Image (cartoon, grey):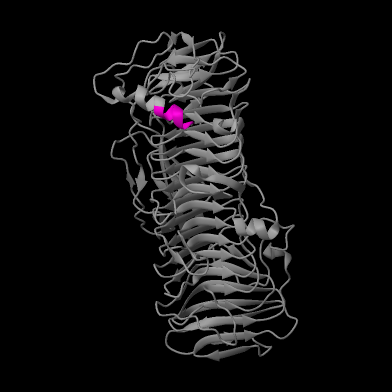
Amino acid sequence: MKPYLALLVTLAFAAVACEGIDLPDFPDNPFDGNESVTSLTDPALAWSSDSFEATIGSSNTFPTLTNKYSVGVTYESSKPEVATISGSGVITLISAGSTMISASSAADETYSASGASYLLTVIDTSGGDAYDGSLSFASTGDPTSDDDISTTTFKGKITVNFSQTGDATVTGDSYNYVTVDGNKVTVNNTGDQVLIYELKGSTSNGFFKVYGAKKQAIVLNGVSITNPDGAAINNQNKKRTYIAVYGSNTLSDGASAAYEKVNDEDHKAVIFSESQLIFSGSGLLTVNALNAAGKAGISSDDYIRLMQSPTIKINSGSSAGNGLKGNDYVQLSDGSLVVSIAADMAKGISTDDYVLVEGGAHMVNSTGGVAYDDEDAEYTGTSCVKADNYFAMTGGALTLKNTGDGGKGIRAGSYDFDSENHTLSDSYITGGTLTVTTSGREVNDVSAKGIKIGWVTKEGSGDNAKVTGYAGNLTVSGGSVTVNSTYCEGLEVKGDLTFDGGETYVSSTSEDAINSQGDLTVNNGFVYAFSSGNDAMDSNGNTILNGGYVMAICTKGAPEVAIDTNTEENKKLYINAGATVVAYGGLESGYSAAQSVYSMSANAGSWNALHDGSSFIAAFKAPSNISSFIVSAPSLSGGYKGVSVSGDAKCGGVWATDGISGGTEVSLTNYTGGNGGPGGPGGGFGGW
């Protein structure tokens, strides 16, 4: 927004903040100056735990749901073949595996939409998920790929049984590849055999280390290994390594683990691999990184892929490193990954290239904060997901929560990657369910973000800083994206941001809900942006609304607006034929509209609708105590207050396109305002 506009608006409306003073009665302004601009009450649904392990046939005490306002709740299991949940919240265990258990409530005249999830891991001790000891494995979901364990023919199996009371025992080693020192077991496969290494038993002072030049499988079959000095599993084989998980397994280092190199060999994590790591199986693996050496839970110098069915839980302590780090990339195709990180600067899922989520149900929680990074000579914070190139999601469920100062849910696209590779790939979301929550503050110039894509360079500082370069685009064309941020931007894209479909719900209580450095374009899909502290939607390029359904709510008041764009550099807001738009808080001055834009009175806190003269176009849920909106839609001719909606509510319960009925018709008046125009605080002063 132009500085002189901000000054004029501030002077013109200084008196509006005084209680009891009404705004002038402008003919096209339905806004009541006595109206209190507040949002709906958040039910703040919350489970008592983020994850839970239940055993079939046992008495399980499942997590409980906090529902302080007793709102109506809908329950869902992401994998009903693993566990189901009834309409009253009763869980029935079906088979081994993991599923995301969700509780959600729709918005109504008092409460905003809310949702909460936890990851339920089901364990079958009857042997239904046990390893049968064979040399062959069922397909893990992608039989055309070499990553599918079923495509490999294994020539033999060596079994290692660890012990708390004596030395580890070894069977099947007809090759004399294995050496045992107490429970410190080393394999040196100098031959051509493609082998399986089955690990069983328990030790509090041991490890499994393997050398080789052929593909291999490590079967975790109810094993527990603690190495107080470093990695519990150290894979020095540079060929593809399958880790098949059966039963319940635990791998840990120690609080004083120094991870000292032997013969200059790295072992950077509790599970470390020089080669690709591909996880499969039907069991549970818990990895505890307790060290103070900044080492990770699981790390590969190549890539990491999680395939069908296993559940992997990584707990990274307050002085440890990343949760899961795949150098080349991380691909979550199925199964479940649960990561908890507590160290400053740590990353939950990290890669020097890209993160791709294709399926499964995954969760990352971060509580770490900001610290000084000696290597990069700057302060940095935590990220639930960090990808130096791009982030992509095509299916599955990913739930991210970062409560640390300077913390981010997703951080994708770095300047270093772009400058080294001369290109930064576009991030994209085509399917799945992505939920991001951040509540940290800015510390040492490190700001928190819900989702941050790309990079930007500037000259100067503050409001006088000039952008000298930027990169990193994001396209949302499917799936469901929900971002709730307290002290930061919800969705920030340093390049172009495009919505081609899907449902995107973004809320921020202090900064822009949605922000792009380049153009912000909506072609299709449902978009909701709410900010009580800044612009709802803000673009430093053009904002182009070609289609879809856009609802932008800004309750901050002038000079902030519902939909902002960079008019200082001759950019513009375009409302083109085909877009359905509902806004509160004003539009950027000088906008261009190919279809009529109106002011409409509405019922606060309930459903209202747009009509084309013969049928309803769409219905939108008004926030509490907001009863005037800027509206535009194809062939829009009228509005309705207080309609009923029986169809499927979209985008967190704020949009509906079917099942609309009833209501009271209201007239529309032409909207000609700009910043602070009707449908926002200080309404009526349009057309500067």
With respect to residue 382, does 45 lie above or below? above
Where residue 271 sits in the image (x, y, percent)?
A: 54, 73
Residue sitting nearer the eye, 469 or 344: 469
Q: Is 490 left, or right, of 160 in this rendering?
A: left
Residue sitting nearer the eye, 512 or 328: 512
With respect to residue 612, does 202 lie above or below? below
Give the residue drawn at x 62%, y 21%: 578
Where residue 12 sits in the image (x, y, percent)?
A: 36, 22
Residue sitting nearer the eye, 567 or 286: 567
Q: Which region is colored magenta?
A: 2-7
Q: Splitting the image into 4 quarters, where does residue 278 fall?
A: bottom right
Residue 408 visible in rendering: yes
Where residue 172 sits in the image (x, y, percent)?
A: 63, 84
Q: Is 353 left, or right, of 18 in this rendering?
A: right
State the predominant SS element of the stretch in magenta. helix
Q: How many labels were placed on the picture?
A: 0
Residue 307 visible in rendering: no
Give the residue drawn at x 46%, y 8%: 667
With respect to residue 121, does 577 lie above or below? above
Give the residue drawn at x 46%, y 21%: 645
Q: Is 93 left, or right, of 596 in this rendering?
A: left
With respect to residue 524, does 120 lie above or below? below
* Residue 458, magenta (yes or no): no
Residue sitting nearer the eye, 469 or 554: 469
Where residue 269 sits in the image (x, y, percent)?
A: 52, 73
